[in-house]
Image (cartoon, rainbow, N blue to C red):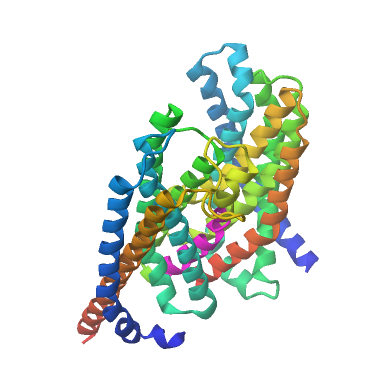
Amino acid sequence: MHKYANPNQFLRIANPLLPWLSGLTVLCMGMGLYLGLFASPKDYQQGETVRIMYIHVPSAWMAMFVYGSMAMAGATALIWRHPLGHMIAKASAPVGASFTMICLLTGSLWGKPMWGTWWVWDARLTSVLILFFLYIGYIALVNAFDDSARGQRTASVLVLVGAVNLPIIKFSVDWWNTLHQPASVVRMDGPAVHPSMLWPLLIMSIGFTMFYFVVLILRLRSELAATKIRNIRLGQAGE
Amino acid sequence: MIRAMGLIIARDVRLTLRQGTDIIMILMFFLIATALFPLGVGPEPNILARMASGVLWVCALLAAVLSLDHLFQADYDDGSLDLLTLGPLPLELVVLAKVAAHWVVTGLPLILAAPVLALLLNLPTDGYATLFMSMALGTPILSLMGAAGAALTLGARRGGALIALLVLPLYIPVLIFAVGAMDAAIAGLPAKPHLLILAAVLATALPLAPWAGAAAIRQSLD
């Protein structure tokens, strides 16, 4: 693992992967959008609004997946002092915050015609809102120090503390009686969604995941380049 | 080890008491913030009674957040925190001792002031016992989680506002279950399940928050 602490080693893997991941993103999102918006059937109760789900559910998954990745990256960085860990956490945060925002907004757009309200304070919605606050807190903390390495280390501790929220989000629909529907894809007795709707959903979530990886690699690359530029400038100033 | 912790607690409490103004400021903030609500939403007794539990707890949360930037900042500035870190007592226990001291000088006054403010807000009589119990279980959690937040922002720019941003989302579960307990008691339902969850949160935060706080302090002293 520590082989990749050297940024060049990491980039040697990441750079060739980038075009493949980008291609997969375009392919999956294109296919998912076509299947979701045109090829899949209307819901017998929800009508056309069910198509919001093909954006809403993958972005909700990504909101949690990105936070989970940040927590793992932060833990790796704190335990093994792996320098890439903090960078991955820092580069992921705005992506995760955006996914959470998209999840909340699409959920709200779906809620108005279906539940008759933009927002309810039920357990699932509230815990996702807290997740959004945690992302914002992370971004604020990471940028609050003059020494950027110090900010990254401290913010990684915060990510680990906030990880308590992830199981709460996942199980909020089981622990409380919520207006939000319970899990229908990841269940003990198999998905309760018809394949015609399940496939576009899964393809979209693969596309979203690939998109995250692409953005992550791009952001890591620019972060590494920025560090390099800073070091060169410091070296020049020292001479 | 217990003795060393006792010494830290006694030192922190003595420092705060000698300064005196800190406790009074927190209590006055609690009073003024609570007093704004009847002025803002109107003084009808039944509306106030309906809102009392939520208003009391929200104001207690804000008062607790307000007190947090004193928790480590002075020790960080004058170097005592370096000495405590280098000392024989594990840093986790130092944090726990400082949390205990913080609770004595903010949590305890809040608990004592809350029933008086509840009178102002016309809290139904059934709510008082649960108010006391939820405060007794809840305020230590506020100090514990707050200590982790305060440790994270040591040396940061705009530390005070940042603490609120980090800590208030973590306080939400306490608010939900404490107010849930009081509303259940007022409605004549058992408040015990909510209080038990609150106790579970306390039991989780008690070992984890000092650990996170100590980790954050170590980062700040590197």
The residue depicted at 40 percent of the width and 43 percent of the height is A104
Residue A147 vs residue A158, the one in the foreground: A158
Q: In this view, does B197 lie to the left or right of A197?
A: right
The residue depicted at 25 percent of the width and 69 percent of the height is A23
Majority secondary structure in the magenta region? helix
Q: Where is residue B178 in the image (x, y as percent from the top left)?
A: 67, 37
Residue A84 is inside the magenta segment: no
- The stretch in magenta equals A150-166
Q: Is residue A78 left or right of residue B86?
A: left
Quadrant containing the C terminus of chain A in the rendered view? bottom left
> Measured along the vertical axis of the image, is residue B163 above or below residue B7?
above
> Measured along the vertical axis of the image, is residue B9 above or below residue A90?
above
Q: Where is residue B71 in the image (x, y as percent from the top left)?
A: 58, 54
Residue A156 is inside the magenta segment: yes
The residue depicted at 38 percent of the width and 62 percent of the height is A206
Quadrant for residue A228, please give it: bottom left
Q: Position of residue A68 (x, y in %)?
A: 49, 62
Q: Is residue A69 left or right of residue B187?
A: left
Residue B40 vs residue B106, the one in the foreground: B40
Q: Position of residue B115 (x, y in %)?
A: 71, 27
Quadrant for residue A105, please give it: top left
Whether residue B127 is visible here, answered yes or no, is no
How many numbered callouts?
0
Whether residue A174 is visible here, answered yes or no, is yes
